[in-house]
Amino acid sequence: MPALDTPRLALRAAGRADVAQLFEVFSDPEAMRYWSTPPLTSIAQVETVIARAASHFADGTGMLWCVRRRDDGRAIGTISLHRFDEQNDRAEVGYILGRTAWGRGFMSEALSAVIDWAFAAMDLRRIEADTDPRNAGSIRLLERLAFKQEGLLRERWIVDGEVCDSAMFGLLRPEWLASAGARANVPHR
């Protein structure tokens, strides 16, 4: 797993030391309100998420970064790249941040680093994001990072018995390069 650093954050593979702190994030009903699964109810479920992430990285089907604050090492969320499509140079991004870290720009900082890395190191052409259209915070974040809403998939998810739609967003490499969010030397194509 590539390690990514920002001024305030360290993004690394999740490990055993992160389980309790990530459980705080993934068990919080408010943080998980728009996630594609209900809140987790046990530490064992977080251990399964981390084990699955390691397996996905090993077989090349996904990557999961644990987002940690650099000042105290505390795990405050995750970012994933998954659904890789090598033929079409695209992947999907997913993210969650613990409620205690909301409103401080942490996810914008972390997601910018992942986007820079994905366009440069993976040579992606496109990154996609799927969010619940009621998740105003996530939509604001995506739009700030130059993602464009491209459509709405109605009744795409059933989460804990609730039928939910998906707002689909896309970000193209030239849009990222032209945006204020681009920080790294991402090669033009």
Image: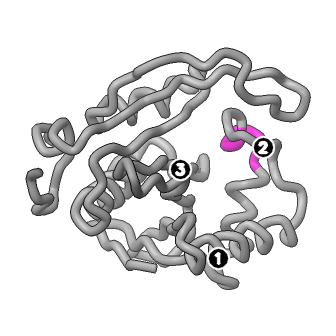
Mark 3–mark 1 Cα distance, whole angstroms, equals 16 Å
Mark 3–mark 2 Cα distance, whole angstroms, equals 13 Å
The residue at the point 54 percent across, 34 percent down is 130
- Residue count near mark 3 (Cα–Cα under 10 Å), binned few <14, some 14–19, many ≥20: many
30 over 25 or under it: above or below: above
Direction bottom: furthest residue: 16
- Our reading of the magenta stretch's main secondary structure is loop
The residue at the point 75 percent across, 63 percent down is 23
Which structural element holds mark 2?
Answer: loop
Which residue corresponds to mark 3? Answer: 95
How far from the left and from the top, in percent, is residue 12? 47, 76
Whether residue 17 appears in this view of the structure is yes
16 over 166 or under it: above or below: below
Range covered by the magenta-colored residues: 28-32
Which residue corresponds to mark 1? Answer: 18
Which residue corresponds to mark 2? Answer: 37
Mark 2–mark 1 Cα distance, whole angstroms, equals 20 Å
Which structural element holds mark 3?
Answer: strand
Direction front: furthest residue: 87
Mark 3 / mark 1, whichever is N-terminal: 1
Q: Amino acid at mark 1?
A: Asp
